[in-house]
Image: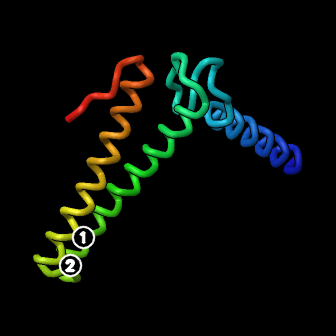
């Protein structure tokens, strides 16, 4: 009797895991890229470049947060923090501009000049 209960419990657990992870395992519908966004005529190169820029943006944000933490904990002097922060934020703005121009090009617009 105990064996039957254990087997039923394992089967139930497997079904629950399968149902919970189904959305994670499902491939995006046709015409949609990573993250569920429609490709709207964008080629794989544009989507790959967008993914690279988004990863670079997140990495840069992480670097900015790390520098802020280092400053707050006393690992960086105010002068060092100011220089590092200015550099990192400038690099982040460049990445954001590249992402924006990629979106403009994908929409068929010419890249905007700032």
Q: Quadrant of residue 105?
A: top left
Direction from residue 56 to residue 70 in the image, left or right: left
Tell me the residue at 23%/56% (across/down). 89
Provide residue 54's location: percent of width, then percent of height.
Answer: 43, 44
Provide residue 47's location: percent of width, then percent of height.
Answer: 54, 33
Q: CA distance from mark 2 to mark 1?
A: 6 Å
Tell me the residue at 37%/37% (across/down). 99
Q: Nearer the viewer, residue 29 or 52?
A: 52
Tell me the residue at 20%/78% (across/down). 73
Tell me the residue at 88%/50% (across/down). 3
Position above or below: 86 against 36: below
Provide residue 63's location: percent of width, then percent of height.
Answer: 33, 63
Would you name the residue on which mark 2 appears? 73
Q: Quadrant of residue 84?
A: bottom left
**Local secondary structure at mark 2:** loop
Would you name the residue on which mark 1 appears? 69
């Amino acid at each position: 009797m105990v064996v039957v209960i254990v087997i039923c419990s394992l089967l139930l657990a497997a079904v629950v895991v399968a149902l919970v992870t189904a959305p994670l395992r499902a491939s995006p519908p046709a015409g949609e890229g990573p993250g569920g966004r429609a490709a709207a005529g964008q080629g794989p190169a544009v989507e790959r470049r967008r993914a690279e820029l988004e990863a670079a943006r997140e990495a840069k944000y992480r670097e900015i947060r790390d520098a802020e933490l280092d400053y707050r904990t006393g690992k960086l002097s105010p002068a060092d923090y100011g220089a590092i922060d200015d550099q990192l934020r400038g690099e982040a703005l460049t990445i954001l501009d590249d992402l924006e121009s990629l979106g403009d090009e994908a929409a068929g617009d010419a890249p905007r000049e700032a």
